[in-house]
């Protein structure tokens, strides 16, 4: 474990004392977001120490020209980067002419808190300057959920031992770079700047993609909380606007600036109105004021927590961690906009380009589906539906025909933008996750209409891909899928990755099953879809053949499916045999050594057992778990959760808990030594899954909701809620019993540890 400076607290993330060596880690951990925009917890005032400045706007990206050593046909031209956007939080501070810089002053009583009940970030400290001047500083900041184009900062300074001048220099800076830009290019064009009274605006446009953004700020001032007005000086430079306000302050008086800032952007407003709307929103926020906006914020968060909260008794670190995960997921995606998605780092860093991966379908959808209205998960499916044409184009580029679709490994707008051949071309299992998500959604919500309105078209295009991607092996007398990378990216170009083959077979069968369903129950949609896709009867006959005759590598001796052909040729030395100094192997070993090793980055065969648990009996699950888990290094954040869930299923309770801790405190304790780059947002959904599906044993197969609750030894109790179809069900588990409360107005049938029970409306059942 790397970090241990975050104080445990049920509802807060707390740093006490200034940890200069962890500033970039803290910038990630204390990040703020409201679904529409987000930012790292950079200091408002100037900081000369190490920092990764980051502010991001949902949906806005730049196609950074691909950089690879050796070009391969089919590579995407660019890698989409979520853009580091103009900085609106900046407030330069001078005390009697001296710059306040936490890297240079002596800092006393520093504390920083992120309150997860309202998304309020606070910071307070005393800064002592070399000449003896001391000031007390208190800063509060949040990104409004009520007005999601606005954020607010209240920055207050109290001189402790002198009367003197305090200067605030609020600014907008549009001269921002992406740290990970491939060619050190500047991604923005500055179009216009406007200054009015205490307001300023910069209009800018992203190069190439042409997103227009208006970044604005409006400031007000208070002396001991009473409003005051001040004269200012204006400094307008090529890419920035700074206002300078100076006031003489007496010892003990508190001088505050309230800064409203944020973005309006062309995905949401006509370009010609951006400035006007920005001014309107900032003035609306200022007229509501900091305190009232915060009150609204608290109400909105309390609505979220009402269904999403998981309460853990008896383990404060676990409690803090699960809330942190739920909190960050809600900061990243609010669910109203089907053009947005959930990047692996959300709004907390640049890595992974901020784009959409299969993480959404495999991990995030169940979280949003169970804790929010079902249209939120539906919007995530619609996102991919709207990108179907691009997925078909993408497959065409690689030589597929007839409307076959290959969804991208990474995307912002539907185009593939990953550019490592072994992933771009080979990690095709992602296509199966698209269909699994539709199945999961329909099965959970009962929204079969979705298949008729959208899902079937996606299923047909993906089935076409699998049929064309498989080939018949005369030698094996079966269909094989060659040259792939499974979820385990520590092996490339393998043949017959079991997980990929299994998904392919299942996708083909599921598509055929749903065609039958539509023919029977939605004949009009069936005709429309057959017409639109030109689906021929011979195609589905071929799908059936491929599915029936799919090959799966299997070891008779071990009684397990093999991750791929030839897996047993490896030296199967368990991870436990590796010394600590060699871990993580992706940072310590050569790539060649990793590829030849038996070590598995993340659930691969076990990912299939997780998705399709109902296809296998417990003995099979156990056998596969015991075979693969000891070889797994869990060097993807997506790994521990799947293992935690399966371990719970087969009663490996200690393992389940070990894996749970690893997923839940991955960022707070920085297990993978990389939190400074940003948080692992998509794996946070996995943490939620490891409680609800892991310890809670929630499953939903064949239209039947079931639970098999267990509880970790050191917890006293835990509870969670899920929205299931028209019901909201609360589950409470302690060591003696389990309680199910049906908060809705209609009865619900569930299976608990194998027994069917009916919970009447507004009723409680104790098991
Ligand atoms: C994992 C992928 C994942 C990606 C983004 C990689 O390290 O291996 O499965 O999609 O990260 O989270």
Image: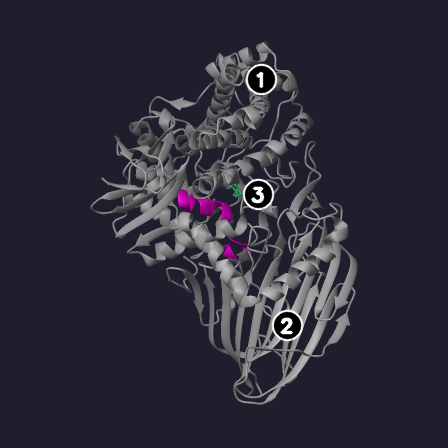
Q: Mark 3 points at which residue?
A: 341
Please tell me whether mark 3 sits on a helix, a strand or a loop.
Answer: loop
Whole-percent x, y for residue 761 in the image? 32, 38
Classified by dominant secondary structure, the portion drawn in magenta counts as helix
The answer to if 615 sits in the magenta stretch is: no
Under circle 2, the secondary element is strand
In the current view of this chain or complex, which residue is farthest to the front?
745
Real-space CA distance between mark 3 and mark 2, rounded to the nearest whole angstrom: 35 Å
- Which residue position is annotated with label 2? 220
Badge 1, how many Cα within 10 Å: few under 14, some, many 20+? few
Q: Is mark 1 on a helix, strand or loop?
A: helix
| Residue 94 spot, x, y in % from top left | 64, 79
Does residue 144 sit above or below 384 in this rendering?
below
Q: Residue 677 carries which label?
A: none
Q: Work out whether mark 2 precedes mark 1 in sequence or the reverse, and give the earlier one.
A: 2
Query: In this figure, what is the number of numbered marks?
Result: 3
Place residue 66 in its image quadrant. top right
Span colored in magenta: 671-689
Q: Which of 364 and 231 is in front in this view?
A: 231
Please identify the quadrant where the N terminus is shown.
bottom left
Mark 3 and mark 1: span between their CA atoms? 32 Å
- The disc placed on residue 524 is 1
- Rounded to the nearest angstrom, the CA distance separating label 2 from label 1 is 60 Å
């Amino acid at each position: 474990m790397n970090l241990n400076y975050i104080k445990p607290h049920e509802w807060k993330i707390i740093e006490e004392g200034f940890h200069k060596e962890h500033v970039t880690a803290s910038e990630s951990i204390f990040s703020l977001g409201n679904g529409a925009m987000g930012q790292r917890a950079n200091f408002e005032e100037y900081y000369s120490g190490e920092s990764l400045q980051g502010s991001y706007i949902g949906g806005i990206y730049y196609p950074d020209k691909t950089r690879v050593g050796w070009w391969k046909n089919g590579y995407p031209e660019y890698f989409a980067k979520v853009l580091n956007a103009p900085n609106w939080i900046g407030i330069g501070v001078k005390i009697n002419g001296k710059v306040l810089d936490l890297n240079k002053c002596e800092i006393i009583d520093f504390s920083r808190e992120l309150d997860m009940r309202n998304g309020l970030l606070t910071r307070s400290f005393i800064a002592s300057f070399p000449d003896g001047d001391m000031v007390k500083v208190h800063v509060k900041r949040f990104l409004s959920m009520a007005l999601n184009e606005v954020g607010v900062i209240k920055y207050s300074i109290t001189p402790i031992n002198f009367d003197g001048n305090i200067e605030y220099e609020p600014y907008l800076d549009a001269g921002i770079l992406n740290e990970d830009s491939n060619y050190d290019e500047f991604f923005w064009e500055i179009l216009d700047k406007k200054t009015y009274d205490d307001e300023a605006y910069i209009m800018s446009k992203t190069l190439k993609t042409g997103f227009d953004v208006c970044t604005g700020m409006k400031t007000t001032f208070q002396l001991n909380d009473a409003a005051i007005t001040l004269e200012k000086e204006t400094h307008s430079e090529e890419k920035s606007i700074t206002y300078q306000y100076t006031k003489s302050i007496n010892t003990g008086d508190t001088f505050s600036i309230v800064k409203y800032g944020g973005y309006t952007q062309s995905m949401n407003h006509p370009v010609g109105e951006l400035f006007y709307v920005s001014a309107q929103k900032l003035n609306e926020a200022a007229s509501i004021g900091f305190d009232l906006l915060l009150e609204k914020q608290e109400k909105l968060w309390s609505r979220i927590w009402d269904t999403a909260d998981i309460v853990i008794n008896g383990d404060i670190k676990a409690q803090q961690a699960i809330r942190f995960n739920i909190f960050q997921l809600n900061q990243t995606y609010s669910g109203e906009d089907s053009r947005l998605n959930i990047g692996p780092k959300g709004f907390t860093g640049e890595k992974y380009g901020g784009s959409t991966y299969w993480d959404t379908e495999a991990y995030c959808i169940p979280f949003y589906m169970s804790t929010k209205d079902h249209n939120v998960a539906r919007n995530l499916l619609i996102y991919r539906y709207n990108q179907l044409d691009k997925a078909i184009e993408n497959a065409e580029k690689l030589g597929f025909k007839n409307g076959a679709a290959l969804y991208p490994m990474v995307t912002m707008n539907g185009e593939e933008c990953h550019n490592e051949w072994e992933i771009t071309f080979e990690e095709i299992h992602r296509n199966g996750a698209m269909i699994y998500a539709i199945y999961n959604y329909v099965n959970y919500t009962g929204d079969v209409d979705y298949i008729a309105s959208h899902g079937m078209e996606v299923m047909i295009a993906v089935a076409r891909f699998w049929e064309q991607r498989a080939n018949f092996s005369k030698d094996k007398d079966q269909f094989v899928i060659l040259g792939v990378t499974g979820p385990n990216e520590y092996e490339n170009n393998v043949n017959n990755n079991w997980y990929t083959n299994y998904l392919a077979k299942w996708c083909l069968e599921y598509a055929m099953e749903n065609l039958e369903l539509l023919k029977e129950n939605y004949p009009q949609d069936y005709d429309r879809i057959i017409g639109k896709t030109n689906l021929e009867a011979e195609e589905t006959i071929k799908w059936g053949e491929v599915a029936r005759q799919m090959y799966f590598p299997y070891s008779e001796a071990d009684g397990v499916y093999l991750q791929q052909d030839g897996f047993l040729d490896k030296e199967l030395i368990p991870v436990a045999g590796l010394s600590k100094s060699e871990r993580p192997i992706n940072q310590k070993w050569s790539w060649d050594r990793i590829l030849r090793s038996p070590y598995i980055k993340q659930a691969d065969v076990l990912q299939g057992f997780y998705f399709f648990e109902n296809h296998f009996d417990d003995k099979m699950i156990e056998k596969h778990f015991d075979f693969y888990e000891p070889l797994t290094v869990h060097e993807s954040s997506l790994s521990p959760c799947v293992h935690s869930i399966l371990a719970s299923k087969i009663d490996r309770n200690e393992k389940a808990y070990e894996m749970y801790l690893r997923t839940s405190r991955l960022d707070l304790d920085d297990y993978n030594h990389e939190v400074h780059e940003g948080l692992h947002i998509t794996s946070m959904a996995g943490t939620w899954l490891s409680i609800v599906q892991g310890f809670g044993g929630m499953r939903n197969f064949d239209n039947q909701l079931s639970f098999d609750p267990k509880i970790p030894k050191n917890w006293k109790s835990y509870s969670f809620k899920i929205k299931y179809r028209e019901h909201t069900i609360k589950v409470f588990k302690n060591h003696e019993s389990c309680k199910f409360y049906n908060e809705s107005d209609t009865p619900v049938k569930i299976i608990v540890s194998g027994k069917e029970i009916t919970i009447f409306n507004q009723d409680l059942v104790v098991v």
